[in-house]
Image (tube, rainbow, N blue to C red):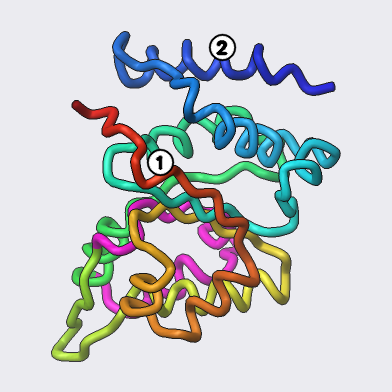
Amino acid sequence: MYPYQKAINWLESKGQELFGNHFKIYDEDKAIIYKLIAYNSSDGKMAFQLGINLEKGILLSGPIGCGKTTLMTLMKYLATPQNKYYVKSCREVSFEFINEGYEVISRYSKPSLHQSKAGIICFDDLGTENNLKYFGNECNVMGEILLSRYDLFISKKVKTHLTTNLSASELEHFYGNRVRSRLRESFNLIAFNNNSKDKRK
């Protein structure tokens, strides 16, 4: 049996190391943390009990300041080798697009011979970027990347993770019905309560 309480204690210690001594694990967040630990440790039995599909990615949603980015940053340290991922801000991706253009979409959508940019990625804060123009052409950069990542998921089982404070209807408004439909198929939705406290205060 995976030592969940030991893992939570370790996460709190690692969080204090990375984010400061004020960091703590809140009791009301433990249900979400158990799901994330089960997923990243590939604990199939617990994942099944918690309704988590290990073949899909994680879509972690919740209000601003509830700790989504912090948790996904911490969880990568617990991830098994097949679950290793890195965190990339959607705003950073959009700035790369401004500077480099459409090559950026391929960078996060196709495996590279030298480095797997198209490996498992957690795109952080989906919805904070805007539609951007490159040489006058407007593009919904993250929308295009998510559609390409879905194709990668179907063809090569490459997973993607997301954090967002957008609701399902807002995701559809920003990225369209095609993206929302594919999100349902390729992600486990794990959601903070809308009343979750702002940990930044």
- Give whichever of 138, 27 is nearer the camera: 27
* Between 144 and 99, the one nearer to me in the picture: 144
Position of residue 20 measured from the top left corner of the image (x, y, whole percent): 30, 14
Residue 39: x and y in percent read 68, 41
The residue at the far bottom in this view is 137
Residue topped by disc 2: 9
Q: Quadrant of residue 164?
A: bottom left
Q: Residue furthest left?
A: 136
Give the distance between the C-alpha atoms of the residues marked 1 and 2, in whole angstroms. Answer: 18 Å
Give the residue at x 18% y 82%: 133
Residue 113, magenta (yes or no): yes
Q: Residues within 10 Å of mark 1 (few under 14, many from 20)?
A: many
- Tag 1's secondary structure? helix
Residue 20 in sight from this viewpoint: yes
The kind of residue tagged 1 is Lys
Q: Is residue 131 above or below residue 124?
A: below
Name the quadrant of the N terminus: top right
Circle 1 sits on which residue? 68
In the rendered image, the vertical position of residue 59 relative to residue 107, given as above or below: above
Which quarter of the image is occupied by the C terminus?
A: top left
Question: At label 2, which amino acid type do we have?
Answer: Asn
Where is residue 176? Give x, y as percent: 40, 84
Left/right of residue 49 with respect to residue 154 in the rendered view = right
Q: Which numbered disc flags the more N-terminal residue, 1 or 2?
A: 2
Q: Which residues are magenta?
A: 100-128
Question: Secondary structure beneath disc 2?
Answer: helix
